[in-house]
Amino acid sequence: MQSWRNRKTLILSRTEMVGLLTPAEYNGCVEQAYRMHGERRFYMDPKGHIVLDKYPGEWEAMPSYIEEPEAAACKWVSIRERNREKYDLPTVFSILIYTHPETGFPLAICDGSHHTVMRTGSAAAVSAKWLARKDSSVLAIVGAGHMAVGVLATCNEVFRWREVRVWSRSQATLDHFVKEQQPKYASFELRPSTNLEKVVRGADVVVTVTPARAPIVSNEWIGAGTHIAALGADKSGDQELDPAILQRARIFVDDIRQCRTDGEINVPLSQGLIKEQDIAGEIGEVIVGKKKGRTSDREITLFDSTGIALQDSATIPLEYERALAAGVGIEKKMIST
C-alpha cells in the first residue's frame, strides 16, 4: 500500500497563479474541455446558484470531473455587488479546489480569479477559432473590466488582428484598460470608445463581457459574416444582445442544460422568441466533428458561453504542475497522521 498521509496540499494566491500558463496554453486546455464535452467523457451538472435577498449578489458552485486529463475540481464563486463601495473589496471572489480523482485528496486550493479571467477569455478565443471567418481581422470587445483582459490575451493567439476596439460606459475604465494593456501588444493599436455602435459595427468578431440585464448590442449593428461570443450572461435574466440577432444567427452553446436557464439564450427562450430546436449545437460537438460550425462566410455565428466547470478541471492540472515546478505557493498538511 502506498501511504499518502504525509502528502501536503498546495495553497496558491492570485499572484502565484499569474503566469503559470501562457494564453495559448489556456486556449488549449479550454478546447480540450469542450472536446471532452463533445465526446461525453465528463461528469458535470449545471452550476448551482445560491441567492440571498439580504446580500445583493450570489454564490455559484461548479464541480466537475474530466476523463482526459483525468481530474476533478470544484470552483466556489462569491459575488457581492456592494463590495467595492462598502468594503473596498473585489466584487467577485473565486476559490478553486483541485482533488485527486481516485482518493479525493485535496491536491491544491487556489485563488480562482486570474484562472477564471483567462479560461473565460479562452472560451471566446476557441469559439472564434472554430466559428469565425478565417479572414477575421477586426475584434470588438464590449466591456473593459477584468474579463476583457483575458479576452484580449487569448483572442490574440487565434487571429492576427488589424484593429481591436474596446467599449465601456466609463471613459476612466477605458483609459485604465488601454494604459495597462496596450504596452503588451505591438501589432495593433487599441481603439477605445464610449460609443458602442462605433465599436461593434463592422467588426468581424464581437465579444461581449458585461453584466447587462437588458440588450445593449443592437441587431442593425451586426453585419453578415460576424461571429459573436456572448460571455456576459451567466444567470437567469441576464441579456446582452438584441433577440433579433439570435433569430438571424447560427447559435452554439457551451452546455445546453446550463445555457437554457443562465445563458444569452435564456430570455429569448422564455419569451418564445427562439426555440431550443433553433440551437445548432454545443461547441464541443463542432470540435469533435459531430456538428457543422460555420456554413458560409455570410452566416452570423453566435457562441453562448455561460462558463462551464469542465473548463476548470481541464486547466488546473497543468497550473498545478507548473506551480510545483516553479516552487510557488505554500504546502500545508491537511490530514492528521
Image (spheres, helix red, strand yellow):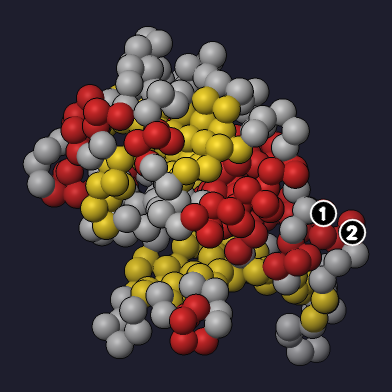
The residue depicted at 29 percent of the width and 46 percent of the height is 216
Circle 2 SS class: helix
255 to 48, vertically: above or below: above
Between 204 and 316, the one lying in front of the other is 204
Q: Compared with residue 92, is residue 274 higher up or lower down, i.e. above or below?
A: above
Q: Is residue 71 left or right of residue 267?
A: right
The answer to which of 271 and 88 lies nearer the viewer is 88
Question: Considering the image in quadrants, where does the C terminus appear?
Answer: bottom right
Residue at point 46% right, 81% down? 85
In x, y percent, where is residue 156? 64, 33
Name the mark on residue 322.
Answer: 1
Residue 147 in view: no
Check contact, mark 2 vs mark 1: CB within 8 A: yes
Q: Amino acid at mark 2?
A: Ala
Q: Quadrant of residue 253?
A: top left
Crowding near the residue tagged with mark 2, few <14, some 14–19, many ≥20 C-alpha atoms within 10 Å: few
- Label 1 crowd bin: few (<14), some (14–19), many (20+), radius 10 Å: some
